[in-house]
Amino acid sequence: MKKLSILAFAFLLTAGVAFAQSNEATTTQDGNNLEATIQQVGGNSNLATQEQYGLNNILFIEQSGSGNIAEQLQGSRETGAYDPDNQASIYQSGNWNLAEQTQASSSQRSYAEIVQSGNSNEARQEQFNQGVQALIDQSGDQNWARQVQSNNAFVAEINQSGSVNRAYQNQTGQRNIAEIDQSGDNNSATQNQFGSQSHPLNGYMGMFQSGNGNEGRQLQEDAETGSSAFLLQEGDWNYAVQKQFGPGSNDASITQLSNGNSAMQHQTGSGNVATIVQD
C-alpha cells in the first residue's frame, strides 16, 4: 500500500507539472537596475508578457486560474526611451481575465496596479509623463475598466464589485484626482478632466454607484484650482450628467437615493455651486 501511494503521488505531481507548463511567460528588458517577476500558480492557458526599457523600473504579474492574459509595457519599444522609476503590478485570480498596462512617453515615478478577481473582466491602463498613479480593482464577472492619464501628478481609481459594470477615466492637466466606485450590476461611469497650460485644472471628480443599471457622466474642462464634481447614486436605473467649464471655482453635486431618477448640471463661469438631491 505504501508503494502504491508513493507511485500515485509521483503520478499526480508529474501531471500537475505538465498541467502548469501550458502557461506562457515572456520578459524583455533593456536598461539598468530593472526588476521583472511573473508568478503563474496552477491553472492553464495563462499568458503573461512583460517589456520594459528604462532605469530602476519594476514589473510584477501574478496569475492564478486559467485563460488569463496580462501584458505590461514600460518605456518605448520604438525609441528605446529610458523612463525611470516606474512600477506596474497585475494580480489575476479567476478565468479569462484581460489586463494591459502601458507607461511610456517620458513616464517617470509612476505607478499602476490592476487587481482582478472573477471571470472575463477587462482592464486597461495608459499613463504618460510624471508622478501618475492608477488603480483598478475588479471583483465579479464581465466588468470593463479603462484609465488614460497624461501630463503630471494624477491619481485615478476604479473599484468594481458586481457584474457587467463599465468605467472609464481620462485626465490631462496637472494634479487631478478621479474616483469611481461601482457596486452592483450593469452600471456605467465616465469621467473626463481636461486641463490646459493656462488652466491646469487641479480638480476632483468622485462617482459612487450602488445598485443596478445606473449611468453617470462627469466632465470638467479648463476649470480653476479647487473645482470639484460629486455624484452619488443609490438605487436602480438612475441617470446623471455633470459638466463644468472654467475658468472658475465650480462645485457640482448630485445625490440620487431611489430608482429611475434623472439629473443634469451644466456650469460655465466662476464661483458657481450647484446641488441636486433626489430621494
Image (cartoon, rainbow, N blue to C red):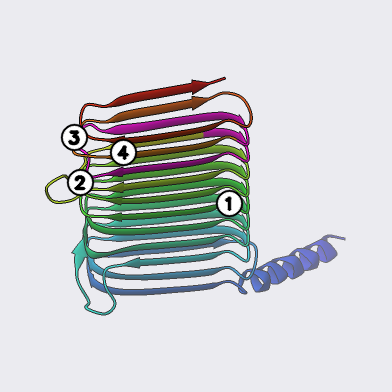
In the picture, measured across the screen, residue 21 lies left or right of residue 207, that is right
Residue 151 - label: none
Q: Nearer the viewer, residue 194 or 243?
A: 243
Visible residue check, residue 33: no
According to the picture, the residue beneath numbered tag 2 turns out to be 174
Q: Which residues are magenta?
A: 209-237
Amino acid under label 3?
A: Thr
Q: Which label's residue is closer to the chain start, 2 or 1?
A: 1
Q: Secondary structure at mark 4?
A: strand
Residue behind mark 4: 244
Q: Are marks 1 and 4 in contact (CB under 8 Å)?
A: no
Residue type at tag 4? Gln
Q: Which residue is mark 3?
A: 225
Coordinates of residue 10 in the picture (x, y in percent): 73, 68
User: Which one is in front, 58 or 155?
Assistant: 155
Residue occupied by mark 1: 143
Q: Quadrant of the N terminus?
A: bottom right
Q: Identify the element where label 1 is drawn.
A: loop
Q: Is residue 222 magenta?
A: yes
